[in-house]
């Protein structure tokens, strides 16, 4: 038999989706921007498949609501440039928005995958990602002497996507979808240790918040005995993490106290904390100048550099204001910030509705994925990047698409030549 024919028979649409999903869930902490390349390439390929009618749109209300919110944000960013007369100059800066615009296309292609299979892929790929993240973090911190940044090249981004992987493992443990719960618990602990090595203090805050959300969602699964066992495991894990990471925790806490003292006693804005305070002052001042439509997507860097130089005597520059909503307020005004907030509100609303109405473990796991993403991104985005980074944008879309599909979507078959036979165990719901 021709080897190409054999390969083509093996690489069915469903099989390709499996490999695609593994890369999307494994790569953010370990391989960094590969998730962005993979997601965007898959989205463009999906556009071509839809154009030649070898795929079909999978349209449902949760997806449409989330698509409307995402597209409203993209439209607000473009409108800001139009109002400021910088549309032509800003065109190259709109390229990252393609990741968001691919949402409904990628959703339609991803939903040919059987739900339970996708849930297990998310759990097991995240498990591997947590172990990989810890291995890289140990090398970077102990051998290279830097804050762990994994494959992301940025400690905050690394910690954010590792938090998502660790919480996916925790949710998988409690959902009952994957029976190897001891492996998942170890993976979640490994992910938490990698986050400690990153030194990203806001993600240290996000981890317990997201963990509590996961526990509350799955509280009905606990009996008295299982609750006691889980609490014991949690206490032991926390003590181990605290003991191993005590040096990092104390060092980062000491830096925060020192920065706070320098800011309050001497007005020193050159520290990490001082710079954030300076950027927030510059950002709110810029927002008051253009409150409705903002200054446009290209304005942040120029406003930041000029403000830091004129007001604080600093020669540094940044591309964002270290607060996701403040950055949106400056670039696209109230319209942009409200549109950005609506993405997270709609995603959380869809997930909450599923949790209220469904007892299906896969659907509840999908809703949990969405809420974990919302909590993690909003917490990290208060003092860092919310959107606008290729890894964060692609990973957000991965979790919103797969989570929304698992929680409330329907499984569809591709059309045309690629249409498969019915997969055993596939979700039959309309």
Image: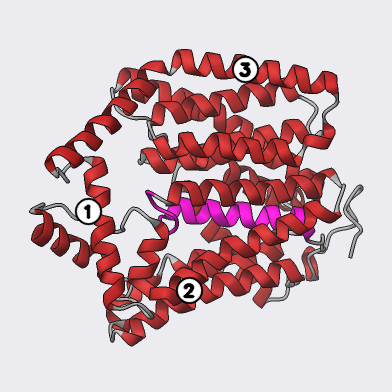
| Residue receiving disc 3 | 235
Q: Main secondary structure of the magenta part?
A: helix
At 75% across and 71% down in the image, what residue appears?
61
The mark nearer the N terminus, 3 or 2, is 2
Q: Quote the CA–CA distance across marks 1 and 3.
A: 39 Å
Q: Is residue 377 magenta?
A: no
Viewer-closest of 189 and 389: 189
Relative vertical location of residue 295 with respect to residue 362 in this rendering, above or below: below
Instruction: Determine the image quadrant of residue 281.
Output: bottom left
The quadrant of the image that shows the C terminus is bottom right
Query: What segment is highlighted magenta in the picture?
Result: 383-408
In 3D space, how far apart are the residues under numbered discs 2 and 1 (Cα atoms)? 28 Å
Q: Which residue is mark 2?
A: 74
Q: Earlier in the sequence, mark 2 or mark 1?
A: 2
Q: Estimate how packed mark 2 is, as few (under 14), some (14 to 19) or many (20 or more) residues with alpha carbons within 10 Å.
A: many
Query: Where 256 sits versus 291, above or below?
Result: above
Q: Residue at x 36, y 41 (%)?
A: 154
Circle 1 sits on which residue? 278
Secondary element at image label 1: helix
Q: CA distance from mark 3 to mark 2?
A: 44 Å
Residue at left 88%, top 52%? 426
């Amino acid at each position: 038999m021709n080897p190409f024919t054999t390969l083509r028979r093996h690489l069915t649409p469903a099989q390709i989706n499996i490999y695609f999903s593994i890369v999307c869930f494994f790569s953010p902490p370990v391989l960094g921007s590969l998730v962005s390349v993979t997601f965007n390439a898959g989205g463009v390929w999906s556009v071509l498949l839809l154009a030649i009618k070898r795929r079909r749109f999978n349209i449902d209300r949760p997806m449409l609501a989330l698509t409307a919110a995402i597209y409203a944000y993209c439209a607000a960013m473009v409108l800001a440039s139009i109002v400021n007369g910088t549309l032509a100059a800003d065109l190259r800066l709109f390229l990252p928005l393609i990741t968001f615009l691919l949402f409904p296309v990628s959703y339609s292609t991803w939903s040919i995958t059987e739900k339970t299979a996708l849930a297990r892929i998310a759990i097991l790929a995240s498990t591997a990602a947590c172990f990989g993240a810890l291995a890289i973090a140990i090398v970077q911190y102990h051998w290279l002497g830097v804050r762990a940044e994994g494959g992301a090249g940025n400690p905050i981004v690394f910690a954010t996507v590792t938090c998502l992987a660790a919480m996916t493992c925790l949710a998988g443990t409690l959902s009952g979808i994957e029976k190897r719960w001891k492996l998942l618990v170890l993976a979640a602990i490994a992910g938490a240790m990698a986050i400690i090595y990153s030194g990203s203090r806001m993600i240290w805050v996000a981890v317990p918040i997201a963990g509590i959300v996961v526990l509350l969602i799955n509280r009905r699964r606990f009996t008295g005995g299982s609750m006691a066992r889980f609490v014991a495991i949690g206490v032991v894990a926390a003590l181990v993490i605290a003991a191993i990471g005590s040096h990092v925790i104390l060092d980062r806490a000491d830096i925060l106290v020192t920065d706070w003292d320098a800011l309050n006693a001497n007005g020193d804005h050159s520290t990490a904390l001082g710079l954030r305070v300076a950027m927030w002052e510059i950002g709110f001042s810029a927002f008051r100048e253009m409150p409705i439509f903002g200054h446009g997507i290209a304005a942040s860097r120029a406003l930041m550099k000029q403000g830091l130089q004129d007001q604080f005597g600093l020669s540094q520059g940044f591309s964002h204001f270290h607060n996701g909503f403040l950055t949106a307020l400056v670039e696209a005004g109230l319209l942009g910030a409200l549109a950005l907030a609506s993405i997270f509100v709609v995603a959380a609303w869809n997930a909450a509705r599923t949790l209220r109405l469904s007892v299906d473990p896969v659907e509840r796991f999908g809703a949990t994925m969405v809420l974990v993403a919302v909590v993690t991104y909003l917490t990290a985005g208060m003092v860092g990047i919310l959107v606008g980074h290729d890894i964060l944008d692609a990973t957000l879309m991965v979790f919103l698409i797969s989570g929304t599909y698992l929680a409330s979507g329907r499984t569809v078959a591709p059309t045309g030549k690629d249409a498969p036979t019915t997969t055993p165990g596939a979700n039959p719901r309309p």
